[in-house]
RNA sequence: GCGGAUGUAGCUCAAAGGUUAGAGCACUGGACUGUGGCUCCAGGUGCUGCGGGUUCGAGUCCCGUCAUCCGCCCCA
């Protein structure tokens, strides 16, 4: 009997975990500099939480959600994204009574029942950020700036920051109408996918990659021409803020997010290094969502980074060494077990990561093991040295060795002594 | 949900229907009984993903199935 992990769900092995931990700690460090605080919400929610926020007609809800009945017959879902749960928590815990803005970040696993491919998995991980209570576009601008800082700290280059506005509940209907009018008499000329999109979400037709569709779309009405004054002003102020923060970007009128709750600002950060799944982070403003969830009207915005995609990009230019012990305590002679344990404990108490054999081995094979662990130092507890109350130390890189008391050896390992 | 490619040793890959299925790296032990890396020797390296079929004979051809990868849809 042989078991495999479930399709699209992968093990993250120790050799990769170091990189994961590094990315997570950099994100935490930087987000906390901007006063975002970590929030942890459950992986399972009532399915309704996602149906209501993401939108019933979206692909995520229609075909990608892990959804099941619990023992009482309630509809439960594994979260396909992070925002809905945070919004639910914000309202349930009445965090709107705290001074605004309330700024949160989260790191965790998300689940979508999709066909896996490069940069896409059924269990994947996001680092996300949500900010509640401020309607000014300085919120989104700060988010893009923060992302820029994060990516710089990870030495990631050649990213495209793309922004757009998709209007609000006042002006978007006008645009949808214009699009429908534009498409209605030409729809038979479009590809099959577009015809399907036309019925479900006409804005998606704008995204089509088929050349003949692109040709017809040359004269399509642009959302930016339909924005109400409020949304226009929001966008231009957003751009001014980005200029002040020195964030370079392009306006891409074709960005349409896959979730229904977005208003005004939407943005994507893409790279050419990931193949077809090129978005490494994406987000936008969602001013109406808290109210739609039964909370007070609360303007909000957020984004999420795809961890696996970020990792993929980092692997090409960032070398993080797998964590390994610094010291190996070996023994030479018989009946030294108690003495070895004492030495090992001493170094661990001094916060030196230490490994030691679990079974009887010749000194030779102990050193071989130490070599393969690529530890820098070996301390040998030897019969001859013990008689002098000393231990033998050895540097595995230089090969040099000597005798010393345990305190002297500690100094050598810590680099407080010149001997190498 | 749709399309394409690939499954052989722990890993990277060979074997054009014909002996008992191979190479490198990695792994274990020894040459070296208190000193790793280098070298040499010996050795597990294996239900050729799984199940059928064709054939005197299948890792090789056919069908099914599962898995992985890449793309479409969509998304982080």
Image: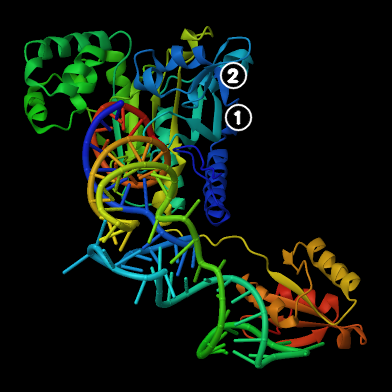
Position of residue A341 measured from the top left corner of the image (x, y, whole percent): 86, 67
Q: Of callouts 1 and 2, which one flags the residue occurring earlier in the amino acid sequence? A: 1
Q: How many marks?
A: 2
Say which of A40 and A332 sits in front.
Answer: A332
Chain hosting mark 2: A
Q: Quadrant of residue A36?
A: top right
Q: Which image quadrant: the C terminus of chain A?
A: bottom right
Question: Which quarter of the rendering shows the N terminus of chain A?
Answer: top right
Q: Could you say which is closer to the camera, residue A299 or residue A59?
A: A59
Residue A39 is labelled as 1
Residue A93 seen in the figure: yes
Note whether A85 is above or below A279 in the view shown: above
Q: Is A23 positioned to the left or the right of A371 in the image?
A: left
Question: Residue B21 is drawn in which quadrant?
Answer: bottom left
Residue B57 to residue A395: above or below:
above
Q: Secondary structure at mark 1?
A: loop
Q: Position of residue A317 (x, y in %)?
A: 40, 59
Q: Residue at (53%, 34%) from the top-left corner?
A: A109
Res A149 label: none
Label 2: which secondary element: helix
Q: Tell me whether circle 1 and circle 2 mark residues in contact (CB < 8 Å).
A: yes
Q: In the image, A179: left or right of A108? A: left
Q: Residue at x 35, y 21 (%)?
A: A59
- Say few, some or many: other residues with alpha carbon within 10 Å of mark 2 (under 14 / 14 to 19 / 20 or more): some
Q: Residues within 10 Å of mark 1 (few under 14, many from 20)?
A: some
Which mark is on residue A89?
A: 2
Residue A267 in the image, given as x and y percentages of width and height: 34, 31
């Amino acid at each position: 009997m042989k078991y495999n992990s479930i399709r699209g769900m992968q093990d993250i092995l120790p050799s990769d975990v170091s990189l994961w931990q590094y990315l997570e700690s950099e994100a935490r460090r930087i987000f906390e500099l901007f006063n975002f605080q970590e929030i942890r919400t459950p992986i399972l929610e009532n399915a309704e939480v996602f149906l209501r926020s993401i939108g019933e007609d979206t692909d995520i809800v229609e075909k990608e959600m892990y959804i099941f009945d619990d023992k009482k017959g309630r509809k439960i879902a594994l979260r396909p994204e992070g925002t809905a749960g945070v919004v639910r928590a914000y309202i349930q815990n009445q965090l709107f009574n705290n001074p605004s803005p309330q700024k949160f970040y989260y790191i965790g696993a998300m689940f979508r029942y999709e066909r896996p491919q490069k940069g896409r998995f059924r269990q994947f991980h996001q680092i996300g950020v949500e900010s509640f209570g401020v309607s000014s576009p300085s919120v989104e601008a700060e988010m893009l700036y923060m992302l820029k800082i994060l990516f710089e700290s990870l030495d990631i280059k050649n990213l495209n920051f793309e922004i757009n506005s998709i209007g609000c509940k006042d002006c978007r209907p006008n645009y949808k109408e214009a699009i429908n009018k534009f498409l209605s008499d030409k729809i038979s000329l479009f590809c099959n996918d577009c015809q399907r999109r036309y019925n479900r979400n006409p804005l998606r037709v704008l995204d089509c990659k088929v050349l003949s569709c692109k040709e017809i779309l040359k004269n399509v009405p642009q959302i930016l021409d339909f924005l109400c004054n409020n949304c226009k002003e929001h966008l231009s102020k957003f751009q001014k803020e980005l200029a002040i923060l020195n964030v370079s970007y392009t306006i891409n009128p074709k960005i349409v997010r896959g979730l229904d709750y977005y208003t005004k600002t939407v943005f994507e950060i893409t790279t050419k290094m990931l193949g077809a799944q090129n978005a490494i982070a994406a987000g936008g403003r969602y001013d109406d969502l808290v109210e739609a969830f039964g909370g007070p009207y609360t303007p909000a915005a957020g984004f999420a980074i795809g961890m696996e995609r970020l990792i993929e990009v980092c692997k090409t230019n960032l070398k993080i060494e797998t964590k390994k012990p610094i010291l190996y305590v070996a023994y030479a002679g018989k009946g030294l077990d108690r003495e070895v344990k004492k030495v090992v404990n001493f170094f661990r108490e001094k916060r030196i990561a230490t490994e030691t054999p679990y079974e009887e081995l010749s000194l030779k094979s102990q050193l071989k093991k130490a070599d393969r662990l690529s530890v820098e130092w070996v301390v040998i507890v030897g019969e001859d040295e013990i008689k002098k109350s000393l231990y033998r130390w050895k540097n595995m890189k230089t090969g040099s060795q000597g005798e010393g008391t345990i305190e002297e050896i500690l100094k050598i390992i810590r680099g407080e002594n010149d001997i190498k």
